[in-house]
Amino acid sequence: MHILVIEDEPKVAGALKDGLEAEGYLVSVAPTGEDGFFRLTTEVFDLVLLDLMLPGRDGIEILTALRKRGFETPVLILTARDSVDDRVLGLDSGADDYLVKPFAFPELLARIRLVLRREKKEKEPVLKLALLDLEMDLMTRKVARGGQELELTTREFELLEYLLRNQGEIVSREMLSRDVWQVKDRSTPLDNVIDVHIARLRRKIDGPFDLKLLKTVRGLGFTMNGEGA
């Protein structure tokens, strides 16, 4: 497990390196934001410990630039900035967790284990999706509700998969246009097309059943949940 520590204070960086290596991690240290950014774009790491207050390019700039490039390695921010606004900014910029200095080393180890477990779980392939008695097998591409197999078109299957992956959340038409229909430019809205497919999907998965799973949230979009009509 290779960790990159981006920290400009030599004593802090040294203590982190020594402590983490004693726990069995392989640790590299980058003393500046630029060095850290270069190493992250040229080497492979399993986790990044990122200080925010760095000379030159600060941690938020680095994190934002990396996430825009599709960088998926988990990042744990270590910083003396402890305001709510700073924490929100760090997490919104793509951090997986945020730990305020000074911190106890056992807490850092616990946070690292938590982030790495979460990363491992997210990478595990999902073979089936379900909501109450609605089941979707992503391998066989079969969908059933209450033990009754449902015949879906390819687009309806993709639409239902997206809704189930985001069950409990409101999914907007913009999200469906971008992620299901793969249309980036909304100059020609797909709202009518999306509504037609939603209506067809609703008839198939909810029509014969008393409990309705697919709901329209007026003015916002759609949601899949098992809370009833």
Image (cartoon, rainbow, N blue to C red):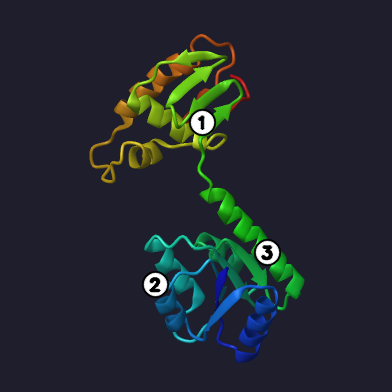
Residue drawn 57% across the image and 68% down it: 1
Dots 2, 3 in contact, CB < 8 A: no
Farthest-out residue, front:
24
Identify the mark nearer the N-term, 2 or 3: 2
Q: Residue 102, which numbered label? A: none
Q: Are marks 1 and 2 in contact (CB under 8 Å)?
A: no
**Mark 2: which amino acid?**
Thr
Q: Which residue is mark 1?
A: 223
Q: Seen from this angle, which residue lies furthest bottom?
A: 10
| In the depicted structure, whether residue 170 falls above or below residue 107 | above
Question: Horizontal placement of 179 versus 7: left or right?
Answer: left
Between disc 1 and disc 2, whose residue precedes? 2
Q: Residues within 10 Å of mark 2 (few under 14, many from 20)?
A: few
CA gap, disc 3 and disc 1: 32 Å
- Left or right: where 91 falls relative to 153: right
- CA distance separating discs 1 and 2: 38 Å
- Lower sequence index among marks 3 and 1: 3
Q: SS for tag 3? A: helix
Q: Position of residue 11 (x, y in %)?
A: 65, 90
Q: Which residue is mark 3?
A: 111
Above or below, comparing residue 184 to residue 147 in the picture:
below
